[in-house]
Image (cartoon, helix red, strand yellow):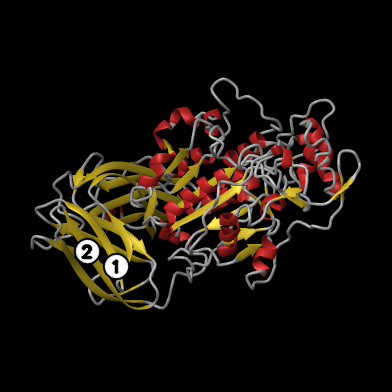
Amino acid sequence: MVLVAAAASSAQCTLDSTSPSVTICTPSDGATVSSPVNIVAGTTDKASAVSFLQIYVDGIKQFQVNGGTLNTSLAMANGAHRVTVQAKDAAGTIFKKTVNITVGGGGGTGPCTLNTANPSVTICTPANGATVDSPVHIVAGTTDSNKVTTMKIYIDGVAKFTTNADQLDTMLALAAGSRRIAVQAWDSTGQVFKSVVNVTVNGTQPPPGDLANIKHVFFMIQENRSFDTYLGRLGQYRADRGLANGVDGIPLNVTLPDKNGQPMQPFHFRTVCHENLSPGWNESHYDVDGGKMDNFMKTTGSVPSTIDPGGHRAIGYYDERDLPYYYELAFQFATSDKFFSPVLAPTIPNRMYLFTATSFGHIRPDAPPSGGFAQKTIFEAMDDAGVSWRYYYIDNSVFLAQFTIWQRDQGKVRNISSYFTDIQNPNTLPSVIFIERGSNSGLDEHPSQNIQKGAAEVKKIIDALMASPTWASSAFFLSFDEGGGAYDHVPPVTVPKPDGIAPMLRPGDIKGDFTQTGFRVPLWVVSPWTKAHYVSHTPMDYTAILKFIEKRFSVSGLTARDSGSPDMTEFFDFTNPSFMTPPNLPAQPTNGTCNKNLETGP
């Protein structure tokens, strides 16, 4: 028996007999169509009832219906599009079908029937006088014998969205009440023309936890910084601005033994760079010292120094004088004082967790075998789920090259220069965006580099997002891959073992397993939808970012680690967005003193 939500005839075509399968009746693969595009699909599933069908356009979910058939129309901009219809049945099986189409074909009629007046703007949706929910879907097109160069949406006279195309399709979060929506266009001759509708936005906003508000997830991970080293003074920064301290920050009165047994207390760095420390498996486990967190200066012997023989640089810290942008970003948006790296080991094993939710036994920066590591990545899991993604790199320090997906999906890997253009069009931007750190260009905030230059690069990337039309539907997660051997006073926490693979210990290694995190690392959650001035105290490691992606886009988990992680929705309020208009953030200076001779103390 074929299990579909309605009679097979309701799918308006003959269904594929393969079980399970999705059949897209219309449009056909390779078709050229007009907008709005009529999409008709049905399912065959002999094992279980189909729970729902979803439509993804260029990897972004646009429609969902409960049942095994659908028939709907979606507005799409002119150009090439990938349409995926994905099904999930009661047994949890996910299956899908994809077609590639061209809308308009260069001579299309636009997203709806356009006004024939020349020039003119037609607002397809919402209709004048309509009552709508927020975020509001706004679709518009133009008629003009000259080239349209710019279109803008104004809400109650304030510009909220800009595109350089001759039509637009976007979602804007609007406050409840009467709203005036104006779409204005400019053409190559300088003519200005517009259309206006008045709508009522319902007081009922999307319920808390409605992740549909987030259509683009960005994540970027910098290098080798503990929470205490970077944001350890955030609590005082908050208190100075009238909020409760509320942060488990660096204890300035703690006394720790240096490498020679002499007592030392944390001190403010006088230099924005210093010699390296060691975050290796053995050093990190020794630093923890059964939870006493007191051996950081002792393990600097693995990176010997004639400048700092006592290892004092391990307990230096920065504050808002050094990193004003980061401190204000953490103050305004959301952060956590219980956010950990996944494993007590150096960069490469931790970054394996970032992409695969396990290091599959690795505890050292092991070289990949010929052909790369075979472990399944979050990128491959997104491919399986029909979720679009892109990988931006700042320079040639591309860690993903160690995975086979690099060879398979090179078209999704781009230089950071493309990012600033791509975010101007949220309709074609993928759902998930990873930004690789710039290690070879000194922009990764590694201890040996001028950290201010790396922070300024991050600011440039986030500032561009805030100024783009993609901002309203985005969440940006920024963190660091591991503590880098720098002091943190909070012990690692217990987490699920990712799999049954044991650590690849060598003779003499400190015994351990993968049931505890690494050290705390800084976190910023930046979005119009993040809670203002929020500090989470929920322990988690950064595989929780993978869990957020998996929950938002219905992607299968990779291991027990990410599957058992908190989903990070606590950082968001989907009822009352705080930052549709981003706050003013300070400039990040780059001219601090970078002198390693000053790394030893005050």
Q: Amino acid at mark 2?
A: Gln
Is 399 displayed left or right of 139 in the figure? right
Q: Amino acid at mark 1?
A: Tyr
Residue 113 x %, y %:
15, 60
Label 1, secondary structure: give it: strand
Q: Can you see residue 261?
A: yes
The residue shown at (17%, 58%) is: 142
Of residues 45 and 222, which is closer to you in this image?
222
**Mark 2 = which residue?**
184
Is 359 displayed left or right of 253 in the figure? left
The residue shown at (16%, 64%) is: 193
The residue shown at (61%, 36%) is: 352
Name the image quarter holding residue 569.
bottom right
Of residues 555 and 233, which is closer to you in this image?
233
Label 2, secondary structure: give it: strand
Residue 189 x %, y %:
12, 54
Q: Gap between marks 2 and 1, in whole Å?
A: 8 Å
Crowd around label 1: few <14 · some 14–19 · many ≥20 (10 Å): some
Is 172 displayed left or right of 151 in the figure? right
Q: Which numbered disc covers residue 576?
A: none
The residue shown at (35%, 62%) is: 171
Vertical side of 49 occupied by 481: above or below: above
Name the image quarter holding residue 279.
top right
Residue 395 x %, y %:
49, 33
Mark 2 and 1 residues: CB-CB less than 8 Å, in contact?
yes
Crowd around label 2: few <14 · some 14–19 · many ≥20 (10 Å): many
Residue 431 x %, y %:
43, 49
Choose the circle earlier in sequence order: 2 or 1: 1
Vertical side of 472 occupied by 41: above or below: above
**Mark 1 = which residue?**
154
